[in-house]
Image (tube, grey):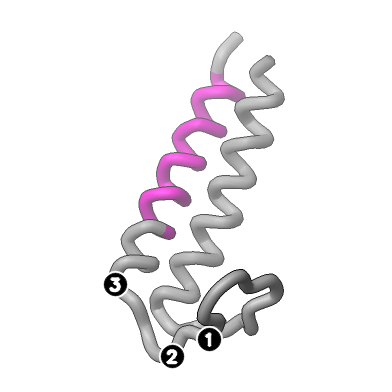
Amino acid sequence: MRWVFATLGLLAVALGGLWLLQGLDIVRIRPILCFADCAVMRGGSLTWTLIGATAAIAGGVATWRALRRS
């Protein structure tokens, strides 16, 4: 079970890092699948920067705790 949490934690770190970089306007990715008004994000976004940082930190903590258990 700990490998499941470690894998989910690593996934959260990866997605959080991507969202953080997009929020800081370092990485720009075109939308792939849209259901409504679809537009490329222009400029940085404080909201996505905070969401990305939070997800990356939470994923790192989850991975560390999952691999630390004996």
Image vertical order of residue 35 relative to residue 3, above or below? below
Along the line of sight, the residue nearer the viewer: 68 or 49: 49
Q: Tell which residue pokes out farthest to the bottom in this image.
A: 42
| Label 3 element class | helix
| Label 1 element class | loop
Image vertical order of residue 48 relative to residue 28, above or below? above
Which kind of residue does numbered mark 1 sit on?
Answer: Ala
User: Quarter of the image containing the C terminus?
Assistant: top right
Mark closer to the chain start, 3 or 1: 1
**Residue found 60% across the figure and 24% down from its top:** 67
Q: Position of residue 14 (x, y in %)?
A: 60, 55
Which kind of residue does numbered mark 2 sit on?
Answer: Arg
Along the line of sight, the residue nearer the viewer: 64 or 51: 51
Along the line of sight, the residue nearer the viewer: 35 or 43: 35
**Numbered mark located on residue 39 in the image:** 1
Where, by quadrant of the figure, is residue 3 drawn? top right
Are the residues tagged 1 and 2 within 8 Å (C-beta)? yes
**Residue found 43% across the figure and 59% down from its top:** 52
Task: Measure the alpha-carbon separation of dots 3 and 2.
Answer: 12 Å
Count of marks placed on residues: 3
Q: Position of residue 55 (x, y in %)?
A: 44, 49
Q: Tell me, yes or no, whether the highlighted magenta stretch contains residue 20.
A: no
Q: Tell which residue pokes out farthest to the top in this image.
A: 70
Q: Tell which residue pokes out farthest to the front in this image.
A: 36
| Label 2 element class | loop
What secondary structure is the stretch in magenta mostly built from? Answer: helix
**Numbered mark located on residue 46 in the image:** 3
The residue singled out by tag 2 in the image is 42
Q: Tell which residue pokes out farthest to the left in this image.
A: 46
**Residue found 50% across the figure and 31% down from its top:** 62
